[in-house]
Image (cartoon, grey):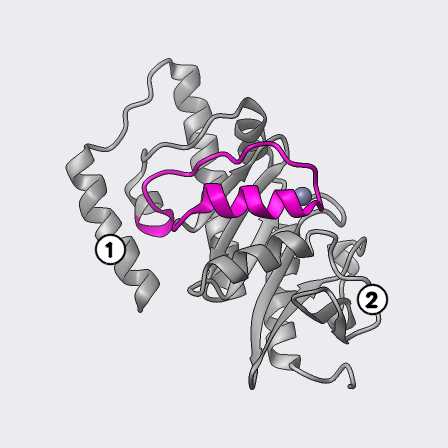
Amino acid sequence: MGSSQWTAERQELLNAAHEMCQDGLVLGSSGNVSLRIRDNERELIAITASSIPYASMELDHIVVIDHDGEPIVGDYIPSSELFMHSAIYRARDDVKSIMHTHSVFASALAVSGMKIPAILDEMVIAMGDEVAVTEYAHPSSEELGIEVVKALDERSAVLIKNHGFLGVGKTPNEALNICKLGEHVSKILFYSHMLGKVDKIPESIVNAELEIFRMRKLS
Ligand SMILES: [Zn+2]
């Protein structure tokens, strides 16, 4: 099949990958972005290619693979984190796009093993009651996919232990916005710790905001 397939979807993915880099959420070719593609009965994944700096990434560098990593469109090697992306799509039917970043403040929390509690209203509405930290698993391993699915649960963001951040959404742009918000909240939590006090949002408010989060996922 020619590389002209799913051009609109791949372009949407490419735009999000470029913005992820411009926003400083990754360095060089690290991180990755994917989009679920339903092709009749088949489930496919469009994903950024491995080892291509985002600054020079073009449409040809967005490849389409099946869940076993077999190439469908494109000649480039898919991201080495394809196991992780595939594991999330298998576990979460509501997820249509995934972005994984190495942004500094989120990665610092992931190194400390410090989860993000419900500290900002916009965070709970967009991500869920907290952002948990996974158990450590080696990058690119199938085990990492298992740990990410476990810690992500029904939420839209997770901190990857000693590694970075991951956000999910219905579109690449939504996953990008989760990653941007994740870095913003991580930075605020970092500074709150420096001030010596971290107050969470009252539980009744968190529960009400969680309802909004769940309704948005279903819409
Ligand atoms: Zn990574």
Mark 2, secondary structure of its residue: loop
Quadrant containing ligand 1 = top right
Decide: is 123 above or below 195. below
Q: CA distance from mark 2 to mark 1?
A: 40 Å
Decide: is 95 above or below 29. below
Q: Which residue, given by chain and number where applicable, does mark 1 sit on?
A: 212
Of mark 2 and mark 1, the one earlier in the sequence is 2
Decide: is 2 above or below 121. below
Q: For the C terminus, which image quadrant?
A: bottom left
Whether residue 170 is visible to the viewer of this picture, yes or no, is yes
Q: Please indicate whether residue 1 sits to the left or right of residue 111 in the image.
A: right
Mark 1, secondary structure of its residue: helix
Q: Which residues are magenta?
A: 125-154
Numbered circle sitting on residue 76: 2
Q: Residue at x 42, y 38 (%)?
A: 131
Q: Please indicate whether residue 150 sits to the left or right of residue 155 in the image.
A: right
Q: For the N terminus, which image quadrant?
A: bottom right
Residue 23 painted magenta: no
Outermost residue, right side: 75
Does any atom of ligand 1 lie closer than 8 Å to the CB of label 1? no
Decide: is 84 above or below 70. above
Numbered circle sitting on residue 31: none
Q: Residue 142: give x, y in percent of width and height.
A: 66, 48
Quadrant location of residue 185? top left
Q: Residue at x 44, y 36 (%)?
A: 132
Local crowd at mark 2 within 10 Å, few (<14), some, or many (≥20)? some
Q: Residue at x 60, y 48 (%)?
A: 145
Residue 137 painted magenta: yes
Whether residue 25 is visible to the viewer of this picture, yes or no, is no
Tally of marks? 2
Outermost residue, left side: 204
